[in-house]
Image (cartoon, rainbow, N blue to C red):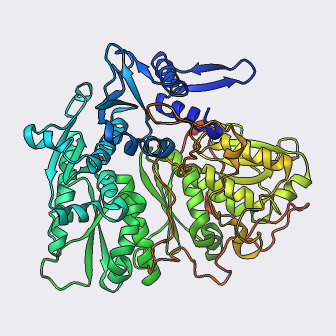
Amino acid sequence: LGKGGKTKQKICNVSGCAIDLNDQDLILEFTGTKAQRRKAQRYVRCVTSQRTGAVYVSEEDVSEDCTVLTVPQQAIGFVTGSKGNFLRTLEDEHNTIMCFAVREGQEATEEASDLMIFGDRIARRGAQLSVMSVVETKVPGYFTDSWHESGATFDDKADMVGDWGTSTMELTQEELSYAIGSQGKTRRKLARSSGCVIQYINGIVFMSGSRRQRERAKEYLKWLLEQLEGPIFIDVEKRDDVTVLEVPLDCIGYVTGRSRETLSLVEDTFGTLMFFLKKDGSATQIEKLAIFGPARARKGAELMVMSAVERKNDGYYTGKLTDRKTTTAFFDVDRLRMEPEDMAYALGKEGSTRAKLATASNAILQFVGTMAFIAGDAKERQRCRDYLGWLLEQKDGKVSVDVQDRSDVTELQLEGEDDVGFLLGSGLQEMRKIELECGVFCVMADGPDGGNQLLICGHEEGASYSATGRLKALRLLTRLVTEKIVRSSWQGKSGGKGGKGWSGGERWSGGDRWGGNRGRSRSPRGHKSSYQSSASKGSGGGGKSNSWSSGAVAGSSWKREDSWRSSTGGGRAAPALPRSGGGSGGRSPTPPWRKSSRPSGGSYTSRNW
C-alpha cells in the first residue's frame, strides 16, 4: 500500500492496471487488460518480496518492459540512498518501479548487483541514465570507459525498434556546466523541448529517442553553446518546431529580465527554448524572438510573453483583435475580450485562479491585455470556457449547472446551509488547498432536488488515492465537510476581501495522512523505510506541469506578472453566501460564453459560443 496508498498508486500508474485492496480479506483485485494485470502482479511481487529479503525474478519477468542495469557494489548504497530515498525519488520522477534483484539461474556476486527498472521505454531509459550518472560520480569510468573504447550506449536491445537509438557527444567542462544549468534546469528544458531523453554522464551527453528527436536535441544544444560567444543566427524558414514572435525594442529588457532570469522562467514553465535572433542589419523597432518546442508548449510561452509585453505596451498585440471562436477539433486558440472587473476576478491573487482553471480544464488560459486567450483542442477549450463562465456567475452565490451529460464533473451533495456556510467560511482555505493539490476547480451549485451541491470540476477523474484528480478531491472534501476540521498548521490569513481566501497557498498535505503508514525500502536487503516522497505536481495532459507560476525568480520584473490594473481591486473575492431571490449585486452583463447552453454529446459548433 505505502504511505497514503502511494506505492499502490505508483504500481497502477506504471502498469496501467487498476488495483483495489479488500481490507477484510487482504485480497488485491486487478482490473485491466491481460498484459496490464500481468505487469501489475509482477510489480506487486517485487515490491512485497523486498520486505522479507532478496528479490528473485525469472527471465519471463525481465523479458518485457524491463531494463537490467548492473551497479557496482561500492555504488549501491549511493544509488539507493538513505532508507531507499534516492531510488524512490527516481521512481517518482520517471514513473518507474525499481528494485535490486537476482535473476533465476544466476548467482549473486559480491562485486555488483542487478537493478531492475520497470516501466515504458522512455521512462526506463530516463531512470537508467540517471542511475548511470550517479554511479559515475562514485566510480568514475565505470560506464564511460566502455563508451570511449567501443562507443557503447547501454541501450536495451528489446527497445531498439524503428528509428529509436542513442546519440552521444562529449563536452568540455565549461560547456558541461552551461548545458546542465542551475539545478539541471537547462538539461530538462532541452529534453522537454526536443522530446528526447537527455542525461550527462561524466562529460558525455547521452540523447535517446527517435532520429528526429535526437537531431533536434543536438541542434538545440549546439545553439545553446554558441550563445556563449554572443547572438546567434538561426534559419527558421521551413521549420515546423518554431514560433517567431516580434517584440518591441522598449520591452526587450522587461521580457528578458536580469541575467535572462525572466525568459528562463517562461522556458521552465512550458518546456521550451527561446532565442532572440541575430539582426540582419536593418534598422527596425522590433526584435524577433524564436520559440522552439512542441506546438502546445510554444503557444503557452508565446502567450505568456505577449501578456508581459501588453503590460508594458498596452494594446501592442490585442489593439486590433476581435473575439474569435474556432470550430476545429484539434489544437487551436480562441480569444474573448473581457470586462476589467471580470478579468480581475478570474485572475485571482497573482494569477492563482487563472492557473487553477487552466489546470482543471487542461487548456492554456492566458490574459493578454483585455483579452482572454484559450488554447487547446475542442473539448479543452469548451471546458475552460465553461469553468470561466461558472466562476464569474458564482460571484453572486450558487450557479445552476446541468451536469447530466458531463464527464468532467463529480458532485458532492451537501446536507444543508451549515455545510455551505462552512465551505465558504472557515473551511474555504482548506477547500482552496485541496483544489490546488488535486488540480480541480470547485463551484457551489443548486442540487437536482433544490438542495446544495459542490461541483468538483476537472479533466482528470483519477482515483481516491491518486496524486491528483476529482476522486481524490471528493475524498478529501467529504472528510473536510464531515469532520469540519480546519488544519491549524496552515500558515496564512483567513479568507476575506481581495481574494486572500482564494490564492491557493502552500500545498495541502492533509489527504495523505489519512492513508496507511507502511513504507518500503529500495535497498537490496529490504530495510524498513520511513521516507515520505514529495507530492506530485498537478497534471494536465500526462504529468506535464501546468503550475504557471507568476514569477518566483528573485529580482524578476515579472514577479507580479498577473496583477491586473483595475479600479475594482486586484484579488479574487470569495463568492457571497447563497441568497434567496437572486439579485444582481452589481454584476457585469452576462458574458458571451454563457449565453448559450452546452451541447449534449460533446459536439462543439459555432452556434454554441
Q: Quadrant of the N terminus?
A: top right
Q: Residue furthest top?
A: 105
Does 533 sit above or below residue 246? above
For the residue pair 174 and 101, the one nearer the viewer reads as: 101
Residue 96 is at least partly visible in this image: yes
Total marks in image: 0
Closer to the camera, 227 or 96? 96
- Where, by quadrant of the figure, is residue 185 drawn? bottom left
Q: As drawn, is 185 to the left or to the right of 504?
A: left
Which residue is depicted at the point 51% across and 70% down? Answer: 550
Quarter location, residue 460: top right
Residue shown at the point (51%, 34%) measured from the top left? 13
What is the x, y in percent for residue 128?
32, 39
Indicate left or right for 542 with 519 as reference: left
State the image coordinates of residue 190 (x, y, percent, origin top left): 29, 55
Residue at position x 65%, y 40% in the image: 4
Image quarter hosting the C terminus: bottom right
The percent coordinates of residue 528 (x first, y second) are 57, 36
